[in-house]
Amino acid sequence: MRGLKRDRDSTPGPRTTSRRTLTATTATGTLALAALVSFGLFAIGSTTASGTRDEGAAVIETGEPVAPPTDTASALPAKNVDAVALLRGDPKVSWRVKDDLKPCAKDAYPVDTSYGNLTGGTEPDVVVNVMTCDDAVGLGTYVYRESGRQRYENVFVAEEPAVYATIDRGELVVTRQVYAKGDPLSYPSGEDVVTYTWADTRFTERYRVRNNYSGAVGNGPVDAPAPSATSGN
C-alpha cells in the first residue's frame, strides 16, 4: 500500500495536467462571467423585460426648441384709436353718416369698435360700426388697416340700413338686414350674413347665408282661437 501511494505521489504527469486543466477552465469561466456581466449592464441600460426603456445615457439636444408660429398682429396688444376722429377725417365716409355722427349722451357716441387681425399686417386692424342712438340700427361699417405710424387706411366700406360687422377667426363677417316692401325698420324680412377674406389688397366674398324671419313673430299679436265653452257640474 505504501508503495502504491509513493508511486502516485512520485508521478508528476497527472498532477501537472490536472493543474493546467483547472487553470484553463478557471480562465474561461472568468471571461464568460465578465461577458455576462457586461451584457447584463448593457441590457439594464437599454430595455427591461417589459420592453420599456430604463435609465441609460442621457441624450443631449444641442438645438434650441422651436416655438410654434404665431400671428404677429394677433400677438400684439391693440392700441385704442379715436374712431370718431377717424370717421370724420375719412373721405370714404358719406356725409349722411358724418351728419348723424353725434353723441347720444355726453361724450357717448353710437360707435362700436373691434380690434383683430384681418389683413395680416403688423398691427391689429380696426372695425368700426356706426349706429343710430334710438334703436341701435347700423348705419355703416368700416375696416381700417394701419398703413404707417398712427395712420390708417380705409379698406372696406358698407353703408346701408341695418348693417353690422364683426371679426370671426381672422375673417370679416358682415350682417345686412333684408327689407321687403312695407317692412318697418325694426322688423326686416330677413338677413344676409356674408363672410369676407382678405386677399392681396382687398376683401373678397367667401360665404353668403340668407336667413328669412318668420312673419308671425314681432309684428303684433297672433289671433288665437277662442277657448271652447265648458259646462260645469
Image (cartoon, helix red, strand yellow):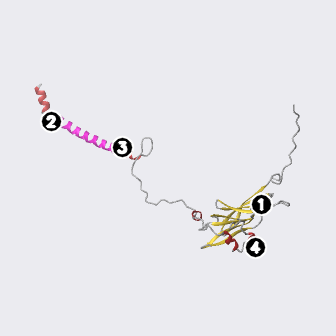
Task: Please rate how many residues cluster around mark 4, counting C-alpha atoms within 10 Å: few if below 14, some from 14 to 19, many from 20.
Answer: few
When the figure is inspected, residue 6 is found, relative to residue 109, above or below; the finding is: above
N-terminal of the pair, mark 4 or mark 2, is: 2
Span of residues in magenta:
12-39
Report the disc number at residue 177: 1
Q: Earlier in the sequence, mark 3 or mark 4?
A: 3
Dot in front, 3 or 4: 4
Disc 4 target residue: 95
Left or right? Give the position of 55 relative to 70: left
Query: SS class of the residue under badge 3?
Result: helix
Mark 1 element type: strand
Q: Which residue is mark 2?
A: 12
Circles 2 and 1, Cβ within 8 Å, touching? The answer is no
Q: Nearer the viewer, residue 151 or 100?
A: 100
Task: Give the CA separation, mark 3 to mark 4.
Answer: 88 Å
State if disc 3 and disc 2 touch (CB < 8 Å). Answer: no
Q: Quadrant of residue 107?
A: bottom right
Q: Which residue is mark 3?
A: 40
* Residue farthest top in this picture: 1
Foreground label between 4 and 1? 4
